[in-house]
Image: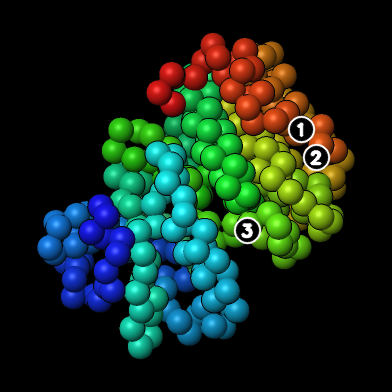
Amino acid sequence: VTAVEKRRWTLNDFDIGKPLGRGKFGHVYLAREKRSNHIVALKVLFKSQLKQSQVEHQLRREVEIQSHLRHPNILRLYGYFYDQKRVYLILEYAAKGELYKELQKCKYFSERRSATYVASLARALIYCHGKHVIHRDIKPENLLVGAQGELKIADFGWSVHTFNRRRTMCGTLDYLPPEMVESVEHDASVDIWSLGVLCYEFLYGVPPFEAKEHSDTYRRIVQVDLKFPPKPIISSSAKDLISQMLVKDSSQRMPLHKLLEHPWIVQNAEPSG
Ligand SMILES: O=C(O)Cn1ncc2ncnc(NCCc3cnc(NC(=O)Nc4cccc(Cl)c4)s3)c21
């Protein structure tokens, strides 16, 4: 893998395989680096679209941030290259694809599967926060699954180093904590809120503050209008954990290392995660 990282790459260093998916800015392809036979995912971004959406700086920041992150639950970005029209991201290939498709398929996950995912995400976020990186966009669409079923946080397109906290609005509202929705100062605890939203969605199949209109979702978030449906039946210890993460005052949210000691996680998460 070190070979993949260092060199100046061009497209003909790779055999391009099947398309893996299509995003807003371009497609992702399975690819094999010819010399090492290393399988990767190649995300192709059109410069015109990046310029049009004024996200070049975000992409540069993502590449910079990702180049320093090494964690089993964080999808590697090995490097990038570009040609006349396109920028190419050389990414770790997540063989079992997108988590949200799996969630749609089985409607919601068991408490054991949910706790295992939440624990591995907490460990990845502890690692990121230790490096002063906040992801800010933790949601099922940004989670991929590796060959052994392990979770991989992907797409640091919205991540930032905490010393230069940003106020820019990000992706879907559902995952944003009150301080980002009210676009006031925010810190690493935004990822704790999003992890709480994610834990709820793993267990119930829908995010906690979902509403038809944007304005209703906004209101439910800032009021922390947290309700637990009668079905599926979920343990009170799971609800206790979620209630300690979805707290309006960001300084009162359960710290990630405390999450790993919570009874629901200890009793339900697979050790390896
Ligand atoms: O392809 C799929 O749909 C699913 N799939 N299936 C398997 C698989 N294995 C690896 N990667 C996949 N997808 C790419 C995941 C990403 C990681 N990092 C990213 N970064 C990014 O897009 N940055 C970015 C883009 C445009 C603007 C800006 Cl500012 C930033 S995308 C895979």
Mark 1: few/some/many CA within 10 Å (<14, 14-19, 20+): some
Question: Residue 62's x, y, as percent?
Answer: 52, 63
Estimate the spatial distance between the alpha carbons at disc 3 and disc 2, rounded to whole Å.
18 Å
Q: Position of residue 265 (x, y in %)?
A: 57, 19
Secondary element at image label 1: loop
Q: Is residue 212 visible?
A: no
Residue hosting label 3: 160
Q: Earlier in the sequence, mark 3 or mark 2?
A: 3
Q: How many other residues sit within 10 Å of disc 2, few (<14), some (14-19) or many (≥20)? A: many
Query: Residue 15, located in which quarter of the rendered image?
Result: bottom left
CB under 8 Å between discs 1 and 2: yes
Q: Secondary structure at mark 3?
A: strand
Q: Viewer-proximal residue, 46 or 10?
A: 10
Rendered position, 199 above or below 57: above
Residue that appears at 12% across and 63% down:
35
User: Which residue in the protein does label 2 denote?
Assistant: 250
Picture residue at 57% right of the left edge, 83% below the top: 52
- Report, in whole angstroms, how far the alpha carbon at label 1 lies from the one at label 2: 5 Å
Q: Earlier in the sequence, mark 1 or mark 3?
A: 3
Taking the spot 39% from the left edge, 52% from the top edge, the residue there is 76
Mark 1 sits on what residue?
Answer: 253
Give the amino acid at mark 2. Answer: Ser
The label on residue 170 is none
- Residue 174 vs residue 143, the one in the foreground: 143
Answer yes or no: is residue 271 visible.
yes
